[in-house]
Amino acid sequence: MPDSPGCVSHPTTETACTLCLPAAFDGYTITQISDLHLGEWMTLDRMMTVVQEVNALNADAIVITGDFISMLGISRGTYIGDYDLPR
């Protein structure tokens, strides 16, 4: 998937150690994605590629932060409900 300005389209790995978590969390993985901006440069096809890539990481938890849709998309009348997204 080609990058947009400021976009990183490949996973990076960070390891965090803390003494506050129970041993059950040893090896627990979290995938975090941010600022998808559906409706601007993020098309539904491109978002589905991101979803497939994130799912392939097989993380224990997925966290989506930042903007999910863009104001540009809203001004053009693009809403999440306009898409037939898989559930």
Image: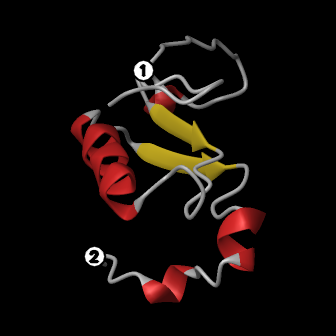
Residue located beneath label 2 in the image: 86
The picture places residue 51, in percent across and down from the top left corner, at: 33, 51
Q: Quadrant of residue 33?
A: top right
Q: Is 68 positioned to the left or the right of 83 in the image?
A: right
Mark sitting on residue 11: 1
Is 74 or 28 nearer to us in this picture? Answer: 74
The colour scheme is secondary structure
- Label 2 sits on what residue type? Pro
The picture places residue 64, in percent across and down from the top left corner, at: 59, 51
Q: Residue at x 50, y 26 (%)?
A: 23
Q: Quadrant of residue 50?
A: top left
Label 2 SS: loop
The picture places residue 46, in percent across and down from the top left corner, at: 35, 50
- Label 1 sits on what residue type? Pro
Q: Residue extending furthest front? A: 76
Is 56 or 36 nearer to us in this picture? Answer: 36
Label 1 SS: loop
